[in-house]
Image (cartoon, rainbow, N blue to C red):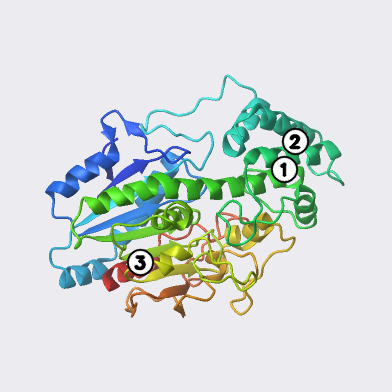
Amino acid sequence: MSLEPIPGTSLQYYLVPFDAAGNQRDDPQGKMSQKILDILSCEQITDVFIFSHGWMSDVAGARQQYNKWIGAMHHNLNDIAHIKQVCPEFRPLLIGLYWPSLPWGNEELSNSVSFDSSSISPLESLIEEYAQRIADTDTSRQALKTIFQAAMEDIAPEYMPLEVRQAYEVLNRESGLGNDGEGAAPGSDRFSFDPEGIFEATKAEPVNFGQFDLNGILMPLRVLSFWKMKDRARQIGETGGFELLTQLQKATANTVRFHLMGHSFGCIVVSAMLAGSGGHGTLIRPVNSVALIQGALSLWSYCADIPVLPGRPGYFHSIIANHKVAGPIITTQTQLDKAVGMMYPLAAGIRQQVVFDPMEFPKFGALGTFGARGPGLEIVDMKMLSVNEPYQFAAGKVYNLDSTQYICDTSDGIFVGAHNDIAKPEVAHAVWQAALAS
């Protein structure tokens, strides 16, 4: 793989790919990280920007997202001019992480290769798709076969069949996920898996997933997949992501600034990169800014003491306790993000939707709905500003930006809402301003 160009600009970025276990993948010329280290050793880079996409992206999807995000940042000319005024030698290096979050997508690094499923039946394809996503075992495949065969007969029966409920219980055990509640590792920060409860909840209020009909007895499968992707995002961040960040910081002078941005489950990836395994990793030095855009992680992730579980810190609290971010942390929220507003509480085991209300914070809720919350944080709640308004970001504070005015395009559908509507000048402006404040 070579440098990835941003269409219509002179910008390029490095796409660093990881497999599902967090191991950096090779391309024919070796690991991309080594190429980046070679660049850092011979060029006067001042700032390193690292981006992570979220759930439901294959290689082509990741490229498309980075083209949009980085393109939006490129077009904020006033912000770039301001940074160059403060730092005349400003020279950024851009890195996009790729992690497999869309089973049976195009996982090949070449643009010319795609997955060919013509040799297997639709049922076998579905079974293999979800086995790769949830648990790659013969036992899980048999459970999946039971679930899909029942769905083919009647996807929305009046009651969940006993054999389907039992198959879901087997699948949940095979997944290896815990149910340890808030403060646990992403993926295990949930109630006990309740397929029948999820089925009943969505039977009352069906959820439209666009081209995929995953209501009825298939909805618990979507929920289980949701938590497995959270678990994968954490694992990749804590292993390969943390190792990459450590390598880059070792190879650069203390004057080189690092800026991290994640979207959706990508916020778990970049948080885990900072925290290290179980929150116990040690960085070479703090990064300079972090942007968590429509984060699909707990609103309590960064706090010192979860209010509904006194004495238990958020899983990523070590980032704050160990001062791993020298500058500001910014988060975005929008009332129109249905992916985190509806899916997150449903997946956690809560049988009702959470209404966007910044005055009432639930036990389970997403950062992209409520912002970062809890004791131990210096929190500033404010509206996202227009591109012509300067922020007064300060080091050590968490800024929750109400972005409903700008992250507002709901054309992706009733389930997704505005979740992916982040390639906006105003979002890029906030990211630039956070980098400038560091």
Q: Which mark is residue 218?
A: 1
Residue beneath disc 2: 147
Task: Name the residue type under label 2.
Answer: Ile
Badge 2 vs badge 1, beta-carbon distance below 8 Å:
yes
Q: Position of residue 279 (x, y in %)?
A: 46, 57
- Name the image quarter holding the C terminus: bottom left
* Circle number at residue 436: none
Kindly report the distance in space between the C-alpha atoms of the residues bearing marks 2 and 1: 7 Å
Q: Earlier in the sequence, mark 2 or mark 1?
A: 2
Res 147 → quadrant: top right
Q: Count neighbours of disc 2 (C-alpha within 10 A) and say few if under 14, some if 14 to 19, many if 20 or more.
A: many
Viewer-nearest residue: 242 or 437: 242
Q: For the residues marked 1 and 3, what is the alpha-carbon distance in whole angstroms?
A: 41 Å
Q: Residue at x 64, y 69 (%)?
A: 309
Q: Label 3, on which residue?
A: 325
Front tag of 1 and 3: 3
Q: Is residue 6 visible?
A: no
Q: Nearer the viewer, residue 377 or 368?
A: 377
Q: Is residue 427 above or below residue 204?
A: below
- Tell me which label, 2 or 3, sits earlier in the chain: 2
SS type, badge 3: loop
Residue kind at label 3, given as amino acid type: Val
Q: CA distance from mark 2 to mark 3?
A: 45 Å
The disc labelled 1 sits on which kind of residue?
A: Leu
Name the quadrant of the N terminus.
top left
Residue that sits furthest to the top in the current view: 119
Point 28% across, 59% down: residue? 74
Tell me which residue sits at (53%, 68%) in the image. 334
Left or right side of 429 for 19:
right
* Disc 1 + disc 3, Cβ < 8 Å: no
122 to 395, vertically: above or below: above
